[in-house]
Image (cartoon, grey):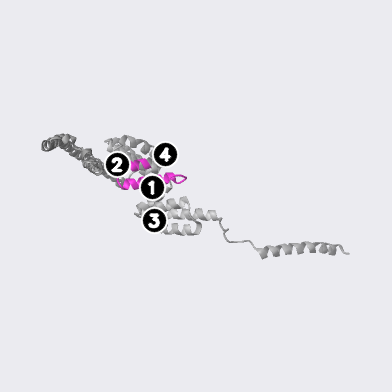
Amino acid sequence: MHASFRCCLMLVPLLAAACASTQNGYRQGPSLAEPTPAPQDQRTTYLDLIGRMQAQGAWYASLAHVDAYRQRFGDSPALRLLQADALRQTGQVDAAQALYQALGSGAQAGAAAHGLGLIAAARNDDAGSEQALARASQLEPLNTDYLGDLGFARLRDGQFEQAREPLAKALELAPGNARAAANLALWATLRGDTATAERLMQQGNLGEESRQGVAQQAQQIRQRLQQRAQAAAAAASAAAQATPAAQTATATTPRRLAAESRTDARSTGHAETRLPPSMLERFRATDTAPENRP
């Protein structure tokens, strides 16, 4: 057999195999569609979407998506936290509070305590707000938002020295954070340290609007503390005025009772030995003979 023919015969199986491989490749073809994400990835992506909606202020829309998520994937603590935040922001405070309280343990405990602190602050419950925000900062000590809110709550309550630590922590953890700089500048302003307040506002690159906001907040807090002090003074004055009258009534009552007792004694001659009505009724019911009567 000719050598070139033998070569052709040897090439035929190779070519056939190559064609078959090519045909199989074209027949199956590479998929151009995105791979279907795993269910867990879908849940995470959807939760992130709801969080972004809330960051943009779409609180009512986020509530609708919370319901849609729950129908599709079921419930989860992370979803309930998003729902609680949306309920609080839309004025459904009691429902939000119940959800926050139910999330008191677990990964969402810090955020739930923060939510409870904000609710208490809106209700002017200074003690409750400070307690909840302190717990949030304890659970998440690096969260500058929680530290800032704790410090601000203490400023509103007149606890200026106690407010410095969380506010200073927030600013040192986030040196470029304008809000942290404004909060610490507010603390300095309330203490009358205008030089430090100015330095902090310069450090935070606060604009004129933010500077005016610091001054307004300081004025509002001073007015609030002044009104609270006036209310406490008025309550103390009212209590002091009521005390002499109560003492007079307390001293008069025994004298009046003694006078009444003497009057009864004069009218009966043996008032001190008189028995209570209930006792008299019991004795009458058990008397069987005249000689047994007292």
Local crowd at mark 4 within 10 Å, few (<14), some, or many (≥20)? Answer: some
Tell me which corner region of the image, top left, top right, bottom left or bottom right, holds residue 121.
top left
Give how far apart the Cα atoms at labels 4 and 3 are: 28 Å
Q: Secondary structure at mark 2?
A: helix
Residue matched to label 1: 115
Instruction: Give the mark nearest the N terminus, 2 or 1.
Output: 1
Instruction: Give the mark nearest the N terminus, 3 or 1.
Output: 3
Q: Measuring from the top left, give residue 219's x and y in whole percent.
A: 25, 43
Nearest the viewer among 59 and 252 is 252
In percent of the image, x 32 and y 37: which residue is there? 199
Give how far apart the Cα atoms at labels 4 and 2 are: 20 Å
Residue type for callout 1? Gly
Give how far apart the Cα atoms at labels 2 and 1 are: 18 Å
Task: Answer with left or right where residue 29 lies relative to residue 89.
Answer: right
Residue matched to label 2: 156
Residue matched to label 3: 59
Give the foreground label among 2 and 1: 1
Q: How many marks?
A: 4
Instruction: Give the mark nearest the N terminus, 4 or 3.
Output: 3
Q: Secondary structure at mark 4?
A: helix
Instruction: Give the mark nearest the N terminus, 4 or 2.
Output: 4
Local crowd at mark 1 within 10 Å, few (<14), some, or many (≥20)? Answer: many
Tell me which corner region of the image, top left, top right, bottom left or bottom right, holds residue 230.
top left
Task: Answer with left or right where residue 120 lies relative to residue 283.
Answer: right
Instruction: Please say if the residues under marks 4 and 2 sit with CB atoms less than 8 Å apart.
Output: no
Residue type for callout 4? Gln
Local crowd at mark 3 within 10 Å, few (<14), some, or many (≥20)? Answer: many
